Amino acid sequence: MKIIPFGLAPVLGCLALVLGFAAAAQTPSSSSTSGGQTLSLNGEEHAGLVTGRHHSLIAYAGKDHSFTLDIGAYPAKPSDIPGFISIDKQIVQVTLVPVSGSAGLNALTTDKEKEMLLKYMNYELEFYKKKLKQHYSHLQTEWVSLNGRLFLLWYFDMPENYKLVSRQVYVSTLFYNRVMDLNAPVFKSDDWGRARAILVKLAGTMRTYDRRLDLEGLRKKL
């Protein structure tokens, strides 16, 4: 199976707002509603924040499949940057990227899952290097199993002369015919281990559904 790079440019273009790669702000092609409607940024789908009276979740409602991530006790709010959520003052992006050859995707071996996730990671890294002209360093990867689901944890350092962000942290997993990707840019004044902990904790709460979630109904229950 081959990873389709559909939508990666819009994702990283939005991320460029945080990293300083682009000067102009991007606007979402469809905005969120009060119930935490899933965002679509220039064709790329992002999970949205669903905030109730007592609790908050990150949720994605697809046509046939959905998922939630439990924020727990962390304070959370929408970020000023489209597609990002601020969780305990750490900005986080939850993105879904399509993959091809979706038939039988749920019956993959662990080795095949790893192969697909590494292809996704390598495509992102190639985009950083060739399109964004950023020469990252000290790439590290870890395989993590959380509640029976395989995740690829990967992170790298930004150039030393870069003024805003020191490191990028990602946690990626397969979600039916897509890659679900959690990303946190780490600012120089922040502890990257804290960003890592937030992403791993979120990933460990991932709950999937074989139906489209009613996000407004979900919000009312929180």
Image: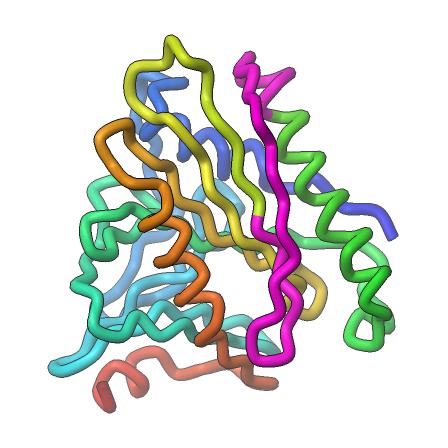
Q: Which residues are magenta?
A: 128-153
- Residue 120 vertical placement versus 209 (above, below): above
* Residue 27 percent location from the top left of the image: 33, 37
Q: Which sits in the foreground, 49 or 143?
A: 143
Q: Residue furthest top?
A: 161
- In the image, is residue 150 part of the stretch drawn in magenta? yes
Left or right of 134? Residue 110 is right
- Residue 142 vertical placement versus 132 (above, below): below
* Residue 117 percent location from the top left of the image: 71, 52
- Residue displayed at 39% across by 44% down: 184
Q: Which sits in the foreground, 64 or 136?
A: 136
- In the image, is residue 69 part of the stretch drawn in magenta? no
Q: Quadrant of the C terminus?
A: bottom left
Left or right of 111? Residue 143 is left
In the figure, residue 160 lies in which quadrant? top left
- Residue displayed at 53% across by 46% down: 43
- Residue 69 vertical placement versus 155 (above, below): below
* Residue 199 percent location from the top left of the image: 41, 57
Q: Residue furthest bottom?
A: 221
- Residue displayed at 38% across by 9% down: 161
- Residue displayed at 18% across by 79% down: 52
How many numbered marks are there? 0
In the figure, residue 138 lies in which quadrant? top right
Q: Residue furthest left?
A: 53
* Residue 96 percent location from the top left of the image: 56, 55
| Chosen colour scheme | rainbow
Q: Which sits in the foreground, 188 or 75?
A: 188
